[in-house]
Amino acid sequence: MRTAAGNDLAGFWRTLVEGRSTARTITSFDAGELPVGFACQVPAFDPAPYVTGKEARRMDRATLLAVCAAADALADAGGPHVPPERRAVVTGTALGGTETSEAALLGGGQPGALYVPRTMPNASAAFVSMRHDILGPSMTVSTACASGGHTVGEGLRLLRDGSADLVVAGGHRGVRVTDHPARLPPLRRAVPARPRARARLPPVRRRP
């Protein structure tokens, strides 16, 4: 897994047990002009052990997160020890490759040749299928914030009805809101009209 709570199962579980908040001050870009200065960022994400530089350039950040998490999940399960045609993948996403879409919309000019494979919602399912020789069902669920949960249910359905013996399932999202001037007006319109102090991180309360 690749989450703000941890990049592996042990770290994720430790964060949950200790009740630690995953909200942190934004460091990936200058958020000084935004009404909120904190977010739940994935810490220390490095795809290098999983994909080459050329492969990474073909993927949006959201897809990279999914590909790395899927590789870890299969390794933790002992590998895909079933025939390729009995393997399946179900991914879930609300928006697809948002970082690529944002760069194309705000950068001007024509989208690059990799725009479609980087932004299509099923990009993660496609890359995971190709990397792990998954020749069975390959699908993507898009049900807003419930997408990840629905992938588990759809994966279970594939197992129950005999369509697959192994299913890689999970949700992904790689949203990044930049400080580009073209994005600030709609963001400001999304907050209350009455001026108020900039939102800050709440104080951390430790469990006794």
Image (cartoon, rainbow, N blue to C red):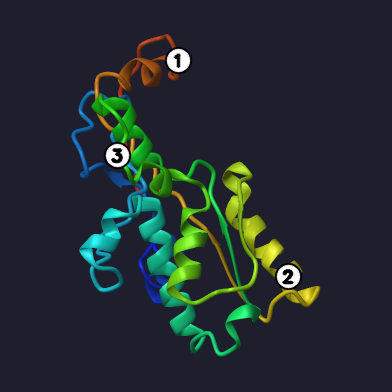
Task: Please name the residue shown 35% across and 47% down the image.
Answer: 23
Which marked residue is nearer to the observer: mark 2 or mark 3? 3
Left or right placement of residue 65 versus residue 139 in this view: left
Residue type at mark 3 is: Gly
Residues tagged 3 and 1 counted as in contact (Cβ below 8 A): no
Tell me the residue that label 3 is attached to: 112
Q: Position of residue 159 (x, y in %)?
A: 73, 75
- Residue closest to the far front: 113
| Residue 180 can be seen, yes or no | yes
- Amino acid found under the numbered disc labelled 2: Leu
Q: CA distance from mark 1 to mark 2?
A: 45 Å
Q: Which residue carries the number 2 mark?
A: 158
Instruction: From the image, state whether disc 1 or disc 2 is nearer to you.
Output: 2
Q: Residues within 10 Å of mark 3 (few under 14, many from 20)?
A: few
Taking the spot 33% from the left edge, 50% from the top edge, the residue there is: 41
Q: Nearer the viewer, residue 28 or 110?
A: 110
Near mark 2 (Cα within 10 A), the count class, few <14, some 14-19 or many ≥20, is many
Q: What is the spatial separation of the Cα atoms under label 2 and label 3, in whole angstroms?
A: 36 Å
- On the image, which quarter does residue 151 sit in? bottom right
Q: Nearer the viewer, residue 208 or 186?
A: 186
Q: Amino acid at mark 1?
A: Pro
Which sits in the foreground, 30 or 171?
171
Q: Secondary structure at mark 2?
A: helix
User: Who comes first in sequence, dot 3 or dot 1?
Assistant: 3
Sequence-wise, the earlier of marks 2 and 3 is 3
Q: Secondary structure at mark 3?
A: loop
In the rendered structure, the answer to whether residue 38 lies left or right of residue 145 reads left
Q: CA distance from mark 3 to mark 1?
A: 37 Å
Residue at figure coordinates x 42%, y 68% from the top left: 69
